[in-house]
Structure formats: C-alpha cells, structure tokens
Image: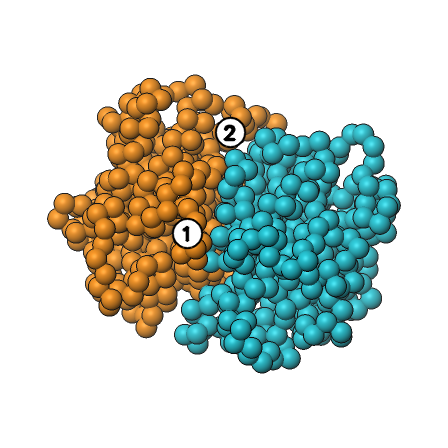
Chain colours: A orange, B cyan
Amino acid sequence: MPTKRLGKNTMQFAAPVYLTGYAAVAGQKEAEGPLTAFFDFASDDDTFGQKSWEQSESIMQQKAVELALGKTAIKAADIDYLFAGDLLNQCAASHYGLRELGMKFFGLYGACSTMAEGLIMAAAYIDGGFADNCLAVTSSHYASAERQFRLPIEFGSQRTPTAQWTVTGAGAVLAQNAAPVGAPTQLPGEQLATKQAVITRATVGRMCDMGITDANNMGSAMAPAVVSTLLDFFTDTGTNQNAYDLIVTGDLGRVGADLVLELMGREGYDLRPIYNDCGLMIYDCDSQDVHAGGSGCGCSAVVLTSHILPRIQSGQLNNVLFIGTGALLGSNNVLQGDTIPGIAHLVHLTGN
Amino acid sequence: MPTKRLGKNTMQFAAPVYLTGYAAVAGQKEAEGPLTAFFDFASDDDTFGQKSWEQSESIMQQKAVELALGKTAIKAADIDYLFAGDLLNQCAASHYGLRELGMKFFGLYGACSTMAEGLIMAAAYIDGGFADNCLAVTSSHYASAERQFRLPIEFGSQRTPTAQWTVTGAGAVLAQNAAPVGAPTQLPGEQLATKQAVITRATVGRMCDMGITDANNMGSAMAPAVVSTLLDFFTDTGTNQNAYDLIVTGDLGRVGADLVLELMGREGYDLRPIYNDCGLMIYDCDSQDVHAGGSGCGCSAVVLTSHILPRIQSGQLNNVLFIGTGALLGSNNVLQGDTIPGIAHLVHLTGN
C-alpha cells in the first residue's frame, strides 16, 4: 500500500481526490458583498421562502446539494457517504435539510471548521477504498445563529469591535475518486475550467485553549489553533509559505487574522504576501458594518465554493492551504465562565 | 487493494480492527442497575466532583479515556485520531472534557448513535491506512440532558410511559491495527480474555423520518432506521439473524425494541431469540422507574464497554451486531412542530 502518512500529523492521499461539483448558496447581505457574482444562488430576504430561520438554513443546505450535483453527472443515488454538520443545536440544519436525500449519513460537529472537516472525511473515505463519491455540506445563518448564541436580534444589543457577523450561506462539495469526462466545467464569470481541483494532503487539528472567555472574540480563540496546525503541516511537508500561492483561514476575521500573522511571524514564517481569511473576503468589511468580519460554517464554505475552487479550476491558483477554523465553545459553558477551545483543520488543494 | 466494500452499503475491512482497551464510567442510578459489577468507575452522586452537570459530563469522558488507555501500553501521545461527540449543544461535553489531551480531533454529532459512528470512523481511518491507534469516546448525563432537551428537573413534570431515562455514563474505546502482545487482559469479574474483540464490517445508516413528533417517544422515531440499516446489512452479507449470537440496538427502549421486532418480523426475520437493546439492559426497567428504558449516547457506550466487549473477549459472544441508534431531532425544530429523523449505524463485532 502506498504510504498515506507524511510525518507525524499529515495525511497524504495515495491518489488525488477530485472536487468535481460544488455550489455556494448565500443570503442578502452576502450578495451585497464583493463575491456576489460568483454565488450559485442568493436569497432576496434570507428566508429562502421558509417560516423559521432554522428551516431557512436547512433549505440552503438542500439547495447547495442540488446545485452542486446538478453540475455533474452524479445523482443522489450515486453518493456513497454524506458528511454534514452546522452550528445549530443538534446540527439541526443538516438533519432537517438533508434527511430526504436517502444518503448514508455521517453527522459532524466542527463548529465553523465543518467544511474542512467534511472534505478531509470525504477524501479519507475515498482514498481509504470505502467510497467513490462523497458529499461535504455545511451552512450557517445569521438569524438562527444570533438567537442561539447571543441575544434576540430584536433586542438590538450593541456589538463589540471584535465581534464577527455570521454568514448566511451554505456550501456543498462533491468529492470523487476520478476526474469527470466530457466537456470542461463552466465556471462563474463565463470562464471554462482548465484544471481539476484536488485534495492532496490534510492535517487534522488539535484543540487549543489559550483562555479566551469572550464569546465576541472568536478570532483570538481560534488563531492559536491555526498556528498549531500550520506548524504541524510545514514540519511534516518540509515546506513553508513560499510553496503556496494562497493560505486561507476560515473565519478568523480581522482580529484573529492579525494574530495569525503575528504568531507565525514569531515562528519565522512571514505569511503576509499569501495569507487571507474568508471572513475578510466575503464582505467589504469597511462598508458593510460587519465589525471584525464574517464567521460561521457558511463563511469558509461559501468562499471556498464561490471563489477558491473556481480559481483553482481556472488556473489562477495552483497550491492552496484551506484551513477551516472552529471555536468549540459550549454556549452554556461560556455562561458558566469557562473558556473557548479552538480547532483548525488544514486541507491542501492543488490544481491538477 | 483488497476490496473494502460488500454489496452497496457495507464496509468490509481488509484487516481486523482490534478494540484493545475500553472503559465504562457510570452514574449512581446506573450503578444500582444489573451491570454495576462491570463498570470501571461509578459516581456516588453524579457530580463527579464538579460544580455544573455540564462539567460532570466532561469529567466522565476524561475519566473514560484515562481508564481505557490505562489498560493498554498506549499513551495519549500514541493516539493518531480522537473521534468524539455527545448530546450537549455544541458537543460541549467532548470539547471541554478532552481539550487537554492534545490529540488530533474529529468532532462527531450522531446523537445517541455516536459510539457506533466513532467506532466506524476509527476502523475506517485505521483500515484506510491513515492511523494505527484511534479513540472513540462519548457520553450523556441525565441532568444535563433533561435541562437541555426537556424541562428543569426541579419542575417535576410527569413523564409519559414512552419516555426514556438518559443514562449518566461515558464510554471510551481504543481501536488499533494490531492485537496487543503480552499477558491476556483482565476482564471485569476476574475473568481473563481468551480472544480479541475486532470490527470486521460496518453499515452506515440513512436518516429515516416516519413523522413522529413526540420528543418523549424517541424509540418509535429510531426503530425504522434500525430496520433500514439491518436490511441493508443482511442483503449485502447474504446473512440473517441466525448468523449472530447477539443483535443489540443502542437505546430504543421497550417501545422501539418491540417495534423493531415487529417490523423485522414483517420482513421475514424473527430476531426474538438473539435481540436485545442497551436501553433495556442497563437498568432493571421494572424496579428502577425508568419507564421505557435507558437512552442517551452513554447508554450504548456503557453497555458496549462494560458488558458486550468483555463477553466477546471471554468467548461468551462471537458474532455481534452492535447498532447505535440516534434521534436527530433539533430541539427548536420539534417546538416548531417538525418531526424527528432517526438514524442507525451498524458495527459487526467478532471474537478473534
């Protein structure tokens, strides 16, 4: 068997895992942001035609799956395993959104790192020989997240400068053990795909808890986890930032992103030329009143599926480290005075 | 590569995955039940020395891991991947209980099916070539679950006859790619192990929703998922109940267990001689006032690690289908009038 491990902490897939179909579904505020042209679907009013915000979020996941599969020759019945989760209590958006698909289902909870966690799972099950086709799906919704994690929106509480804005959006990615045959994929913006986006390596994160207790400062809680995972990956691969044309974190926002640059700088890695954060990409942070930037499972899922994967397929990006970040706080535990563990899962994406 | 799939829905591992260390931690009511002699640790007062029920539940997971590893030569640093989840919002028991272990961590949400989901993950990562040693961990706590899913205990609401009692307990299982060398394991009750318990096959479930809306009747919501998964497994393996000496579900309780027997009977399979449910095994249901039986992630985790795995290692059981069952309800969705999707993951355990 070809070796599937690199160093102590990195998975190296024996064969490339192809990301052949993907879709981004987004809300109204996201559609007013800089990535609007690249979404597969955006809602005018964030309800997606539903009566509750929880149901709206479920419908986003359903729609993302439908749109992702619609770009491929793969049907729901061809999917071997579906990996999904979200921020709602009991991961309700995934269960209620995807229950009718009839797919073999693994529920994940990685907070905002769920898209990266799902991609790693999909790649491991395919490369492990258990599956040909897997789906990774996740979502978040501003209104369902606010009332669950913070305060009723109607309460109109003041947001702190470190607070982030939960992205209303869902992403679905189809992973396959082979590249599709036939005509090249049409990308958003009328481009044609010249390459396939593939997963070649992954590094799973460890929980890091540096004692942050402020649930309005998730970026700081997650930044040390990014550093831990990135150092593991650089060590295992013998590479540094110069080998990549984009290193992108999930939803650290301005505060967390600055911390990553500073902490990695202290370790001797200057990430500035190639680093970005999905929470800073999805909104125009200066004009859209989102304070420190975007967050939520939907943040990295939407930026990945609307912006990063198309740019890999068009040849603009060749070597990307996509690092999903999760604040694993328990909402009750934080009220009890406990701190916020963070986690970061890294997926190495290349153009093939 | 040897084939790792059997039929359309079953994973068949190329090499046995050994369950070499495991531990059951339980609460006071559980220690008054029929399995008390087999627990590795039981609390006198369910607090486990903590100030909140959420913290108590976290400590149970920590203790289960410590006790499971303590029975083996494996240390925390040798663990490749840790798979864990629980019933608390944001899977808080796992995050706060396991954050200090420093292990690469995958968060799962499978509701009460989490132990089976974790075992399947551990086996897939080992057999897929990504890991040598994996841990699967889960828990539930009566007091943290009641206040999250139902009503404050102090409210003293009347329980319905179909209601189940959430087990206070945690289980941890170490899965390895090889059997341990050295002296045979000491089992609870002073027996020595004559065999190793191994995972040979697994069938992942699909969500089934038959329209149950009563959150006090989870057994009925989960029973159809058991039937779906068991039929997939019987079809793929060309076997029936006669090939197994125990088919055991996670936490259907009396109502759900009776439904499984009836529904499987209609399909032509008489499970009665070899069927049981962990929710009926962990308590003396007639005398312990638990209504329809036990439930919660801890239910199947504790019965597996205190009763089923030791009996496989002692040679009393040789061929077991362990079926984790989960009610994937969203607590908000049920209040909004939505129904309860169920899921069931099957793990085929044998004595090797």
Crowding at label 2, few (<14), some or many (≥20) Cα neighbours within 10 Å? many
Along the viewing direction, whichever of B92 and B245 lies nearer the viewer: B92
The chain identifier of the residue carrying mark 2 reads A
Q: Residue at x 67, y 45 (%)?
A: B173
Q: Nearer the viewer, mark 2 or mark 1?
A: 1
For the image shown, how many numbered marks are present on the structure? 2
**Residue A174 visible:** no
Along the viewing direction, whichever of B111 and B204 lies nearer the viewer: B111
Along the viewing direction, whichever of B131 and A258 lies nearer the viewer: A258
Q: Earlier in the sequence, mark 2 or mark 1?
A: 2
> Disc 2 designates what residue?
A9
**Residue A265 visible:** yes
Numbered disc 1: secondary structure: loop
Q: Identify the amino acid type marked 1.
A: Gly
Find residue B346 and report its image quarter. bottom right
> Disc 1 designates what residue?
A337
